[in-house]
Image: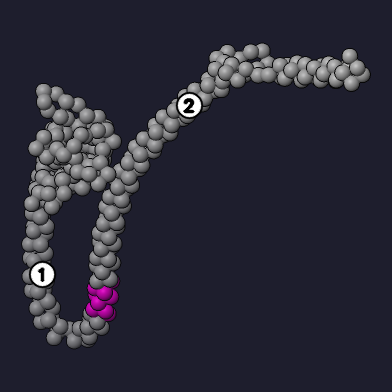
Amino acid sequence: MNLVGKIFVFLVFCMSLVFMAFSVMIYATHKNWKDEVMREVAPPNGTVGWAKRLRDANNEYEALDNKKKDLEDQLSAERALRRQLVAKLETEKERLRAKEGQTQQELLVQLDLKKQALTSVAAHHSDMQVLKGDTDKLREQIVVALGEIDDQHGKFLVAQEKAHQANGTAGRLGQRQKQLVGQVTKFKEVLDNNDINPDDPADGSAPKVDGFVIRVAESQDQLFVEISVGADDGLRQGHEMEIFRGGTYLGRAKIVRTTSDRAVGKVDRRTQKGEIRARDKVETLRALDKI
């Protein structure tokens, strides 16, 4: 073998050592990517695989999404309750305004009566001054005054008789007032015993209220709904409520039982247009629907 061959053999040997070093380095830094993705248990000073991380992230996302939906439902319920409270406060405000107007009218009447009384007192005072002057004149003309005194005495007797009659009339009016107060008390007892609110409409129509469905129950092919408004809001047995979801009409329910803040209605199957669920909106039957 000549010198050139020996040189090539040496170069091949050196290159073999270089490639062997590269192979050792590549093997030392090699990762098992399948194990990195599918690993279920974290090794010491390591983490679980990417597949488990993705499942954990998806589970956490689903839990957060469910929590978000629950919070949205609670927010809707709180908004509905707030609308009811606002409606009650508006009704109370209107009642107080009406009472305030009535009180102001009564105050104006009392002020007018007071002015009339002051005018009458002033007139009587003026009359007394005139009478005092007349008395002085009568003392000077006593003979003529005796006849006038007799005439005034007769007028006084007539006025006294009228006063006695007025006192008798006042006594009769007082007795009549007591009778009327007794009758009003009896009427109020009858209204309270029969749970009748005198502020309710005389024709028995339902007041304008709205709420939402709390629970839906089915019994013997009959559908019942429990709603969030009751007797305190003016609902009575026999009133009818309409059920909506958004802008979709779902049907009509007739109130069969009420408590102070709840009511139960029986759904009229003939009017039902879709499935009724909790959180659906309810409101009293519209006047247009009664025609």
Q: Which of the image's four quarters has the N terminus?
A: top right
Q: Is residue 19 above or below residue 148?
A: above
Q: Quadrant of residue 262?
A: top left
Q: Is residue 126 above or below residue 170?
A: below
**Nearest the eye: 207 or 289:** 289
Q: Which residue is mark 2?
A: 58
Residue at screen point 65% across, 19% down: 31
Q: Quadrant of residue 22?
A: top right
Q: Nearer the viewer, mark 2 or mark 1?
A: 2
Instruction: Classify mark 2: residues with Cα within 10 Å, few (<14), some (14-19) or many (20+).
Output: few
Q: Is residue 188 above or below residue 264?
A: below
Q: Residue furthest right?
A: 3
Q: Along the horizontal axis of the image, is 56 left or right of 107?
A: right
Identify the main secondary structure in magenta: helix
Sequence order check, earlier mark of 2 and 1: 2
Q: Along the horizontal axis of the image, is 84 left or right of 45?
A: left
Q: Are marks 2 and 1 in contact (CB under 8 Å)?
A: no
Residue at screen point 16% across, 49% down: 286
Q: Position of residue 10 (x, y in %)?
A: 87, 17
Q: Along the horizontal axis of the image, is 70 left or right of 151?
A: right
Q: Quadrant of residue 135?
A: bottom left
Q: Along the horizontal axis of the image, is 36 left or right of 226?
A: right
Q: Which residue is mark 1?
A: 159
Colour logic: one colour
For the residue marked with disc 1, what is the amino acid? Answer: Ala
The answer to whether residue 260 is seen in the rendering is: no
For the residue marked with disc 2, what is the amino acid? Answer: Asn
